Image (cartoon, rainbow, N blue to C red):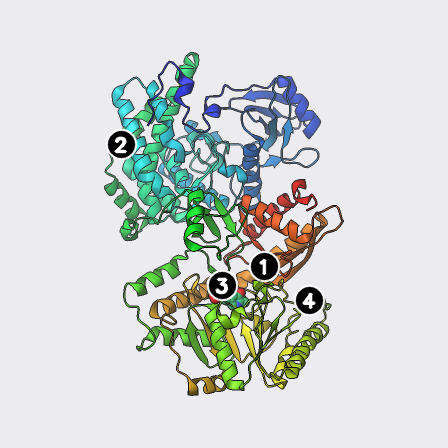
Amino acid sequence: MSALPTFNDPDALARDLPGAALLGADPAPVQLEDAAALLAEHYGLHGDLSPLTGERDANFLLKTANGQHCMLKISHPLETPLVADFQTQALLHLARHAPALPVQRLVPTLSGQPSLTVHLPHTIAPRVMRVFSYLEGLPMPQAPRSEAQRLNVARSLAALDSAMAGLQHPAGDEDLPWDIQQAHRARGLLQTVADPARRALALSALADFESETLPRLQALPRQPIHNDFNLYNLLVDPAEPERMAGILDLGDMVLAPRINDLAVAASYQLSEAGDALPALCSFVAAYHSVAPLSSAELTVLPALVRARLAMVVAISGWRAARQPHNADYLLRNNAISWARLSSVAGWTDTAVVAALHQACGLSPQREETPPVLPTTTDTTALLARRAHLLGPAYRLFYEEPLHLVRGEGVWLHDAQGKRYLDAYNNVASVGHSHPHVVEAIARQASTLNTHTRYLHAGIVDYAERLLAHMPTALGHAMFTCSGSEANDLALRIARAHTGAQGLIITRYAYHGVTAALAEASPSLGALMRLGNTVRTVPAPQAAGHDTVEVGRHFAQGVRAAIAEMAAAGIRPAALLVDTVFSSDGVYTHPAGFLQEAVQAVRDAGGLFIADEVQPGFGRTGEAFWGFERHRLVPDIVTLGKPMGNGHPVAGIAVQPEVLAAFAATCRYFNTFGGNPVSMAAASAVLDVIEREGLQANALAAGSHLRERLSALRQRHPQVGEVRGAGLFIGVALVQPDAAGPPPATLATRVVNALRQHGVLLSATGPAADTLKIRPPLVFQREHADLLVDTLDRVLSNPALHHPA
Ligand SMILES: Cc1ncc(COP(=O)(O)O)c(C=O)c1O
């Protein structure tokens, strides 16, 4: 570590601390008459204007002639418009998703904008101007305090955090002031603390934070947080002072572990009287009653409280050193902060953590497990090692490959701590790291894992549950480790039953990696040769929207393939289709169009194999399986991807008379397929789909998402047909005029730009010109809104539309 800078150069003390320029900035006042003129011009508002105090921004109170009050805020020139927009978007998000929370509302400009950028005389940088509704209420420090009030503070924070969890904004990735994640970098500021005992106290809190707590934060749920729930930012009802009447000031928002917000709030709730622990416990338990905390979050809380308090004394001491004339004001809360810090410094963390668990009714047993951390955060080095060790056949998504280290629900997190909305991964269908599935896998793995040549109830119980979701004709289930193996097995069974070899697939199909299936997966690329007995048919596209017409068109292709096979002396064993035609570009409608083609192949002696690896397990919302939407009963159904939420489990359901010939000539054993751990995972996935109503959610969230995507067409002519069912959606991009890029180029740019904006999806179809959206089934309306708003923003960027 470099030597600490000396105290006679206060600015140098802060050189390690991100956001220090803003923390140390002098206020940038705005003349009253300039503010009044801006209000009149952009808001049509007039009245009595008076300045309000503010740490950085220029704030004013406006009383209009008709008695209306509102607040004008003009951001500090050092705060970038992007960061101000983070706060603006948070307020808009809260108004939409948590209208009952007492936060300020934005008053729109005369042209309907939530904010505007202004250039003021004598300032070079643009400043962001916003007008807020005025919240009536008594600032909490002026109100009588009570336990009921304290608990309401915790509950309000929990409600606020829950509402903010769905907010995504690029400014979250900026280095912002007051972020506890940077607490250790405030170390230099403590040079301004004259008392060596105090300095040592704060330094030790920061050192412990850096070595013990910081590495653990990476594994905790992150989201935008308020980050300054101090008493001056809270208003209460003067008539009922235990009731919260206002939550002010989103000016210190950051993207951080959610628990940091609670640590900040708790640090202001500790009494100085030495009974800090009971106060902390009741405060945390009240938060937990609204927004349940995990054991891992509780474990880091004491250290976070200490780090925050150390940050407070470091920053206030440093500010006072920079502005000695203002020291009294800047240090007004210093004594209480030091008192709190020395009180919490005396805690024994194991005892505090145990007390917190008890207060929340949580068992600490799982928290002893060390968090799974990335083995490296050096993404560039990892890329090079990967290429060296895995060789050239592997491919990565994105121009800037993504190094993911953690997921929960619909969110994925990269090694740098950035969070992404996952709108792509249908494998983690009940949500990343779903605790019920994780627990089921862990429990079974710690009990027994063998294979299917021993009797075990797990496989039989699961087969029973799975087949209960199938048409009764499908009476047997068999298990594999991948969708490819499932299709391979289905093909062998179909060939054994029919005595024929021919296989009909769609023109841009993907069915797997085995030798037999790679030859039946033209989407692997033009260099991949089709098998001698494989024939392709055009996907059911461009044939209108009438079921009979689309069905006839598709069936004609199947009949032509059968005729072509006959000419080569081949009989069809099966028609194998992905029932949402995902790699062909997503073709789901009109439901029922598959019937005629299936009849055609059966008339020629072949079977119908429904590949449900993509659409199965409730994704289409309308039905549990894609084939059900077409009112068909397949001879064989193949399953995979979402079946174990990421655990490698797959399989088939088959009609008993279809299986008979295969079984008569061949035994079936798959070392890992159907093992007790896999069956526990698959069974837990069914539990979650059923308990959490995920099929119904796919229907509701999916139709909202399709509606909003379709509406984008009015703003962006490059958005073409929006296809799909439930949460399997394809958005075709088009080239409305010759000035823009071809659709495939645009799709690549959109996919990469969305990744930079924290939303993950991909492109599909023969030309890769269709956006492919198939998020975990726990995707909600608010996630759909975030996806569409981000897509809207990305498509509005002219840089995306230059010709190729
Ligand atoms: C429709 C379809 N079938 C089969 C497979 C093969 O599944 P797996 O990768 O598990 O072998 C895939 C994989 O993407 C698929 O999309």
SS at circle 1: helix
What is the CA distance from the residue labelled 4 to the residue labelled 2? Answer: 68 Å
- The reply to whether discs 2 and 1 touch (Cβ–Cβ < 8 Å) is no
- Label 1 environment density (alpha carbons within 10 Å; few <14, some 14–19, many ≥20): many
Disc 3 marks a residue whose amino acid type is Gly
Badge nearest the viewer, 3 or 1: 1
Numbered circle sitting on residue 345 = 2
Mark 3, residue position = 693
What is the CA distance from the residue labelled 2 to the residue labelled 1? Answer: 50 Å
Mark 1, residue position = 702
Disc 2 marks a residue whose amino acid type is Ala
Above or below, 778 relative to 144: below
Image location (x, y in percent) of residue 107:
63, 34
Can the viewer see residue 616 in this picture?
no
Badge nearest the viewer, 4 or 1: 4
- Label 2 environment density (alpha carbons within 10 Å; few <14, some 14–19, many ≥20): some
Front-most of 48 and 18? 18
Quadrant in the picture for residue 192: top left
First in sequence: mark 2 vs mark 3: 2
Image location (x, y in percent) of residue 364:
28, 50
The residue at the point 27 percent across, 34 percent down is 275
The residue at the point 40 percent across, 17 percent down is 10
What is the CA distance from the residue labelled 3 to the residue labelled 1? Answer: 14 Å
Disc 1 marks a residue whose amino acid type is Gly
| Residue 716 as seen in the image, left or right of residue 621 | right
